Amino acid sequence: MASQLLLPTNTFTNSSLVKVFVTGDDLTLKRKPNHATRVSYGFSLRANAALISSHRSSVEVPRQWYNLVADLSVKPPPQLHPKTFEPIKPDDLTHLFPNEIIKQEETLERFIDIPEEVLEIYKLWRPTPLIRAKRLEKLLQTPARIYFKYEGGSPAGSHKPNSAVPQAYYNAKEGVKNVVTETGAGQWGSSLAFASSLFGLDCEVFQVAHTYQQKPYRRLMMQTWGAKVHRSPSELTEAGRRILQADPSSTGSLGIAISEAVEVASRNEDTKYCLGSVFNHVLLHQTVIGEECIKPGPSNSTRCTGGGSNFAGLSFPYIREKLKGKINPIIRAVEPSACPSLTKGVYAYDFGDTAGLTPLMKMHTLGHDFIPSPIHSGGLRYHGMAPLVSHIYDQGFLEAISIPQTECFQGAIQFARTEGIIPAPEPTHAIAATIREALRCKETGEAKVILMAMCGHGHFDLASYEKYLRGELVDLSFSEEKIQESLSKVPLVV
């Protein structure tokens, strides 16, 4: 899922700014009279370079992860056992996760110390740059100030190693030999393969069939770091064979790939399961993104949302400050129109996977049987939204919108041709929503500050760009009948 924050700031200012005014949830900036915003392309490049350098020198890698659950007056509903429908106990998860991960999943502590071994690896790419998109602002002729937090400089090219590294560390520390996972677009699979190679773990990845074929270089990244990669659904598991029997040409889904990975972990004592989104401990690890942003940075935000890790990483520290009454940002989640779990799904208990092997989680879901259209944002093709993100959406802490993929790629082209970075398809949703907001500011004259999450680069997604540039990319949707059929299979939990 994508995210976009609209925030107040007094750090990233220029000489024409006097004051920040907050009107309701909107943040507007009053400027000195007779100071037009004229920024040459050359000045913009120099200013951004100086901004990145200043940011990296003034911001340290966070030494703690932040747990939003600790500050919520209404706690999220518990996970339930898939057979008994009773609240999950720690012992119920030991076949899947190491003990420290289970503790982090259930903790009510506000901050969790990051192990020194993890911090040292984080420092290979963190802190990540916070950049003002002045060239995009100029193209749009908007008075809005646009910033993006860029996570594409990690070894895997996305935000996913923020959780892959600690998950690999905790497994290795407890003597686990093998880890297994699923991946949609490939960012998570490559991140876990990278992290596993650092800690001497064997790694096995079930990659959604559509992106297994569409993104061979992501697969090769995983294999280069030593992982075994399987096309999902596969003949290796009972779950995969059942899907292929019903539909031999299945393009797969994250729900199916999760079922296969969980099955492998459950039947092998020396193997644990890792996942790149949805669960609380993953969202916890990703908060290093927002913690690096919030001290020097702006405070409104737009982010893409699929399972919720990227969204949570940037937004949760801002929600903490909002709960303290220090800021009042608009927090907006952006999802693909073809897989709109927040905007079209129901808030109910459902399985996190297709086969029903995972705990039941209360989340916004399209039904665990829902198989999204093969959109190019493979990381957003998930039937449900992280339970914690779903909970705070239900509590009114954030907004959600959905955007079709052609508008997202149009925004990505504008971004690439001004800011130079070719985005992964997932954050193009945040870009498209940011452009919408910036153009509204152009109409109203408001100088809002917009912060968006740029969760990764698109160097392995150029086939998608080729389709768009040829005019062959179309907007994919879903039928209401298909969703209703899938929702009819959501377990009835009273």
Image: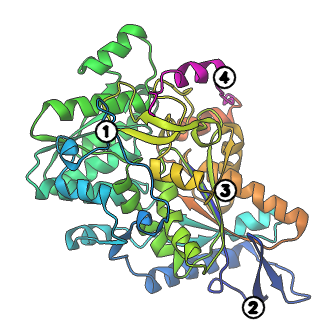
Q: Position of residue 196 (x, y in %)?
A: 21, 51
Report if residue 482 is visible in the image: yes
Q: Which of the pair 321/47 is nearer the observer?
A: 321
Q: Nearer the viewer, mark 2 or mark 1?
A: 1
The residue under label 2 is 15
Q: Residue at x 58, y 34 (%)?
A: 339
Marked residue nearer the N-terminal end (2 or 3): 2
- Numbered circles on residues, count: 4
**The residue under label 2 is which amino acid type?**
Ser
Marked residue nearer the N-terminal end (2 or 1): 2
Q: Which of the pair 76/30 is nearer the observer?
A: 76
Report if residue 150 is visible in the image: no
Q: CA distance from mark 2 to mark 1?
A: 59 Å
Q: Please tell me how crowded label 4 is: few (under 14), some (14-19), or many (20+) other residues with Cα within 10 Å.
A: few
Q: Which mark is residue 86?
A: 1
Q: Please tell me how crowded label 1 is: few (under 14), some (14-19), or many (20+) other residues with Cα within 10 Å.
A: few
Q: Please tell me how crowded label 2 is: few (under 14), some (14-19), or many (20+) other residues with Cα within 10 Å.
A: few
Q: Secondary structure at mark 4?
A: helix
356 inside magenta stretch: no
The residue under label 4 is 480
| Labelled pair 4, 2 in contact (Cβ < 8 Å) | no
Quarter containing the C terminus: top left
State the extent of the magenta-drawn residues as a range: 472-494
Marked residue nearer the N-terminal end (1 or 3): 1
Q: CA distance from mark 4 to mark 2?
A: 52 Å
**The residue under label 1 is which amino acid type?**
Glu
Q: Position of residue 89 (x, y in %)?
A: 24, 47
The residue under label 3 is 415
Q: Secondary structure at mark 3?
A: helix
